[in-house]
Image: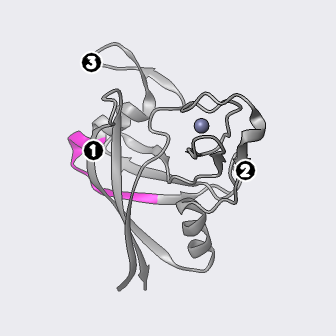
Amino acid sequence: MEVLTRFSTRIAGVASGEKVTHPVTREEVYTRQWYLEMLQDSGIKVVDLIQEPTNSYDENAVAVFVTLPAGRVQLGYIPNASAVCGSCNKKFNPPIPNTCPVCSQVDPATIFPVDRIGLATKITSWLNNGYKFKARVMSIGRTSDGKYLGASLEIERIQQ
Ligand SMILES: [Zn+2]
């Protein structure tokens, strides 16, 4: 097995989606945040990259799944920037907002759709060409604002 490319990325969408009552703190938390906690406790490193061609926001979406002792769960997605703010150059993942959350530019005409040239599109293209991937968790920690748990992955494109 030869490693053709090795790169790292964060998992996107770890603080979105459904919520659940945390079994210990009793607080309402994003389900994926709870999964990240369980992942951290389990010490499990191997995750799976699963294409999601029926995703209505992004046909090149690549979901990140893991099998925990409690079952198989989705942690989030591989990032895939798809639009850029013409005012501050912030890049966005789908869905594209009408107002830039960074510079508050409200004119929708200043947020430009760009080609889906992000990492998920690149991985989708490789998968469609028969390449395989191995992905593992490198670290789990708080995001820069301290509010949420996030995770970084190391991904290897391999030749079998
Ligand atoms: Zn902006």
For the residue marked with disc 1, what is the amino acid? Ile
Q: CA distance from mark 1 to mark 2?
A: 31 Å
Figure quadrant of residue 3: bottom left
For the residue marked with disc 3, what is the amino acid? Val
Residue 140 is marked as 1
Locate residue 7, reporting x and y percent. Answer: 38, 68
> Measuring 34% from the left and 30% from the top, which residue is drawn there?
145
Question: In the picture shown, does residue 96 fall above or below 62?
Answer: above
Does residue 84 appear left or right of residue 40 in this picture?
right
Q: Earlier in the sequence, mark 3 or mark 2?
A: 3
| Pick the front one: 63 or 86 | 86
Figure quadrant of residue 125: bottom right
Which element carries disc 2, helix, strand or loop? Answer: strand
Question: In the picture shown, does residue 77 fall above or below 34?
Answer: below
Q: Nearer the viewer, mark 3 or mark 1?
A: 1
Magenta segment boundaries in residue numbering: 39-48
